[in-house]
Image (tube, rainbow, N blue to C red):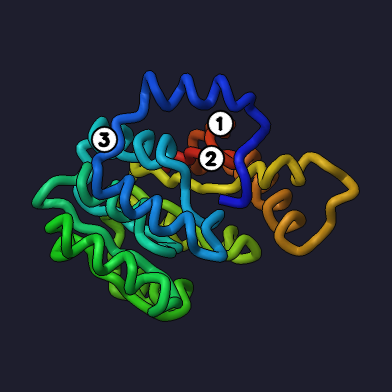
Amino acid sequence: MAGDLSIPHSIYDYLCRHSLREPPILARLREETAAHPRATMQIPPEHGQFMALILELMGARRTLEVGVFTGYSSLAAALALGPDGRIVACDISEEYTSVARRYWKEAGVDSRIDLRLGPALDTLRRMIERGENNFDFAFIDADKTNYANYYECALQLLRPGGLIMVDNVLWSGRVADPAENDADTVALRRFNEKLHGDSRIDLSMIPLGDGVTLARKR
């Protein structure tokens, strides 16, 4: 999460009071992460709840995550998947994911999460080579310049009808500002254009958090 889009605090507070049902363990993880210098990398709680609802509606059992950080999204997903659900979670940081591991264990879901440390593209390509193509859901929230590559890999790993959720696609509005041309913004702008024209998917971009895209594999 780079930063939430502009929404009046009073409306956001109302939304949380009348919608958010955050489990205490997720609230504690969020609060601990808030003190981290890179706390803005964590998804907001309403995003985690939205993802959990989608997983439950899909009856998802096998999911993929690219970008773990301190584990809020993977913990929300694991709780929603239930005891027979499994997550392959990709990240490069032992430091960040050590926090995630601690909360996964406390929540009793650590056996559901297969954390694979190392460059995510290497992990995903090995999975493709092994013929893994039966994931129900993928969540992408990692380095923006590789979004298109992560997306292409996830598309191969998903079953038909599977769903990809991508975070930060509005990038605090910078993608809509022609004056913003840093590498991340340009990559996200091109990524959004790519998905808009991709006939392999059904598509919806929504102004949740910092912008979320849902791409359903046809």
Mark identifier at residue 206: 1
Q: For this view, does 18 lie left or right of residue 180? A: left
Picture layout, residue 28 above or below residue 20: below
Q: Position of residue 134 (x, y in %)?
A: 26, 55
Q: Position of residue 146 (x, y in %)?
A: 59, 65
Q: Amino acid at mark 1?
A: Ile
Q: Are marks 2 and 1 in contact (CB under 8 Å)?
A: yes
Element under label 1?
A: strand
Q: Which residue is mark 2?
A: 213
Picture layout, residue 217 above or below residue 16: below
Q: Amino acid at mark 2?
A: Thr
Element under label 3?
A: helix
Q: Callout 2 environment at 10 Å: few (<14), some (14 to 19), or many (20+)?
A: many
Q: Callout 3 environment at 10 Å: few (<14), some (14 to 19), or many (20+)?
A: some
Mark identifier at residue 58: 3
Residue 152 can be seen in this image: no
In primary-sequence order, the first of circles 3 and 1 is 3
Q: Callout 1 environment at 10 Å: few (<14), some (14 to 19), or many (20+)?
A: few
Distance from disc 2 to disc 1, alpha carbons, whole Å, reads 6 Å
Q: Residue at x 76, y 64 (%)?
A: 183
In primary-sequence order, the first of circles 2 and 1 is 1
Element under label 2?
A: strand
Asked whether 207 or 32 is in front, the reply is: 32
Q: Position of residue 9 (x, y in %)?
A: 59, 27
Q: Amino acid at mark 3?
A: Met
Picture layout, residue 195 above or below residue 99: above
Q: For this view, does 25 lie left or right of residue 216? A: left
Q: Which of the 4 quarters of the picture holds residue 210?
A: top right
Q: Position of residue 87 (x, y in %)?
A: 26, 59
